[in-house]
Amino acid sequence: MKRYDLNPATAAFLTFLLTFFSAFLFYPVSFMLKGAFFADGRFSLKYFSLLLESPLQRESIFNSFSVAFLTTALTTLLTLPLAHWMTRFNFRGKMLLGGLLLVPMIMPPFVGAIGLNQLFARFGSLNLFLMSLGILKPDKPIDWLGQGGFWGIIVLQSMNLYPVMFLNVSASMANIDPSLRESAQNLGARGWRLFRTITLPLILPGYFAGAVIVFIWAFTDLGTPLIFGFSRLVPVQIFDAVNEVNTNPMGYALVVFVLALTLALFLVSKRALAGRRYEMMARGHTGGAEVQATARQTVGIWMVLMAVIGLALLPHLTVMADSFARQWFFSVLPGEWTAENYSEVFGHGLTLLDLVLGVMIAWLLTRKRVPLAGLLDALAMLPLALPGLVLAFGYVAGFDFKMRWLNPRDNPTLLLIISYSVRRLPYIVRSAYAGFQQTSVTLEEASANLGASPMRTLGKITLPLVMANLIAGTILTFSFAMLEVSDGLILAMREKYFPITKMIWQVMGRIDPNAPGVACALGVVGMVILTASLLVAGRILGKKTGQLFRV
């Protein structure tokens, strides 16, 4: 018979967790479900019928699926060869290139869209440069971004999201037992056949973990299409419906549609992999099976990887240049440089709540036998699968009542903190969980044998041993919360409460030639902070950094 480690303190904390998740996760979701499925007090699918009957909504749904599918496909085409080369070959400069491949993570597509638009808009730098050379006629600019920004969104999201898939796929490739590949080679398998029959089936769990995140992220991205002015996408339609949340139920139907799609994708991916077995007799590291690349292979790998990295960093470099531009309008390069744009820069972010919740959840999961531990683990990780767009809309709809301190229309500060905490809680849980797993429980048992209480043991023994992991998780939580797009754009409705992402959007809407420069300055500050946090986290967690981006 299973025995649980329950005492009054543990029971109280579990009760608090249940209350917290009920109020700030289940309640807003249930409120949206009610708004979508009930009309005039009765269960009805009327709003979904109206959704499918609307040409605008049908086009938005089709466009969102197209963006998500094409982004995932392009990311896959980029990631598989990159991960194969980085795990299979040993060559000069490998560590440097491995680090550079992850650099695009330092800036959300929302900010990168400003740089890409500056370069490739109809009258952006590239077209103006071609016009100055006489190659292009001024009245016939090339639409590099395609269909009003549609292809620009796909390229930008692919360049920003491929590191997430790369971390998952390369980790899976690194865990393949080298003897399996060697056995297949001894039987005559080479090239594509070796990859298709051995490597691909074994990396499917890691690939699906990354592909699902990329697909959902691309489907629910709000900031990028707003910057490009491409409105016929589901996230933008939801954003427009926020102001009509009390009068127009179509917003509820759209949000529930996104929520259902998200859950369906995860369930399908889990079920598709559940019936297959991927265990190996041994887990060899590719370090022992790496092939020394020839000089020609090294040059080829460097050329391809630098091309990918260069394209991925092009929006970053443009944003940095624009942040120092006094004015950059109808010219190939800024006409005048200035540092005045940084005078308006500020930041925002709080992580204390995540730190406390994350540590306690990870400690309970690794050190205690508690009822419904699997459910607790799932609840802690669920926000990774729950788009911020869905949660933010639920907060606006569910907390729109007279308590001003909890109503985002009056003061969104508390809900912004809670939203950031719920959305980024998995980073703390994963970091702490990894630390607890690597720390021997015998030290805690020795402390208990000497009469120390569980809380004293946690504070004096366990926490100091996992402090590096907690620092890494906290830094990542702070940085990603500060650059959260959907929550800030939807929940912050008054300028004095704007977080950095909403301020970027607000500044870009000004009728002011200096506005893009100020917005880019804000973006550069965010890039610098996130870069520092990723470097520190990577230094502390090493190869386990990729686990933070798995669902």
Image (cartoon, rainbow, N blue to C red):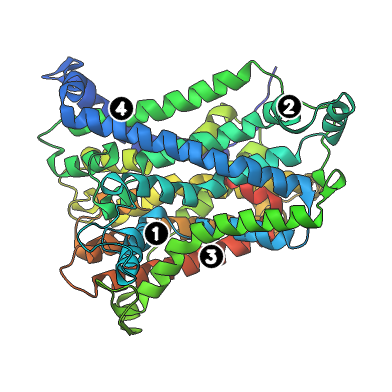
Q: Earlier in the sequence, mark 1 or mark 4?
A: 1
Q: CA distance from mark 2 to mark 1?
A: 38 Å
Instruction: Specify whether 83 is left or right of 315.
Output: right
Mark 3 lies on residue: 531
Pointer 4 local density, CA inside 10 Å: few below 14, some 14–19, many at least 20: some
Provide the secondary structure element on which disc 3 rests: helix
Mark 2 lies on residue: 193
Q: Would you identify the image quadrant in which residue 526 lies?
A: bottom left
Query: Which amino acid type is marked by label 4?
Result: Phe
Q: CA distance from mark 1 to mark 3?
A: 15 Å
Q: Is residue 199 above or below residue 437?
A: above
Mark 4 lies on residue: 257
- Camera-nearest label, 2 or 1: 2
Q: CA distance from mark 4 to mark 3?
A: 34 Å
Q: Earlier in the sequence, mark 4 or mark 3?
A: 4
- Camera-nearest label, 2 or 3: 2
Residue 218 location (% of width, % of height)? 40, 41
- Residue located 10% across and 19% down the image: 40
Query: Which amino acid type is marked by label 1?
Result: Gly
Q: Nearer the viewer, residue 389 or 437?
A: 389
- Camera-nearest label, 1 or 4: 1
Provide the secondary structure element on which disc 4 rests: helix
Q: Is residue 216 above or below residue 308?
A: above
Mark 1 lies on residue: 112
Q: Earlier in the sequence, mark 2 or mark 4?
A: 2
Provide the secondary structure element on which disc 2 rests: helix
Q: CA distance from mark 2 to mark 4?
A: 40 Å
Residue 551 location (% of width, % of height)? 54, 36
